Amino acid sequence: MNDDTHGIQSKLEELKRLLSELDATILDAKTKDYLIGLAKFWVSDADHFINEGRAGAALLVLSMVEQQLVKAKKLVAEFGPNIQMVG
């Protein structure tokens, strides 16, 4: 594993931890799916790209995962784990 792949793998593991934390924190199932559901799929895609040696694709997907999780984390920090989507 080269340095680039190792760095990408480290970023993936960091985002997996944040995803797991948010998954355990957000109580409403619909809100959880809305806020982090897509990120779950993207994490799987990034893992697949890393295993294929497609570092550029993995980095692109991980940046999208990070953006999504940062937004979700801010919402949970502001509104708490009982946050619910309305409408």
Image: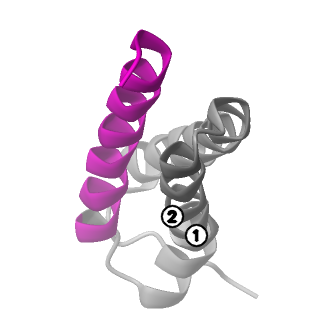
Whether tag 2 and tag 1 are in contact, CB under 8 A, the answer is yes
Asked whether 12 or 37 is in front, the reply is: 12
- Element under disc 1: helix
Residue sitting at x 35%, y 69%? 26
Q: Which residues are magenta?
A: 1-24
Mark 2 is on which residue type? Ser
Q: Which residue is mark 2?
A: 44
Q: Is residue 4 magenta?
A: yes
The reply, left or right, for residue 33 in relation to residue 38 is left
Number of the label disc, if any, that sits on residue 41: 1
Residue 2 vertical position relative to residue 5 in the rendered view, above or below? above
As measured in the structure, the alpha-carbon distance from the residue carrying label 2 to the one carrying label 1 is 5 Å
Can residue 84 be seen here? The reply is: no
Residue sitting at x 26%, y 47%? 17
Q: Quadrant of the C terminus?
A: bottom right
Q: Is residue 41 magenta?
A: no
Number of the label disc, if any, that sits on residue 63: none
Asked whether 66 or 53 is in front, the reply is: 53
Q: Is the stretch drawn in magenta largely helix, strand or loop?
A: helix
Residue 20 location (% of width, % of height): 28, 60
* Circle 2 residues within 10 Å: few <14, some 14–19, many ≥20: some
Residue 30 location (% of width, % of height): 54, 88
Can residue 77 be seen here? The reply is: yes
Asked whether 69 or 85 is in front, the reply is: 69
Residue sitting at x 48%, y 53%? 47
Residue 38 location (% of width, % of height): 63, 68
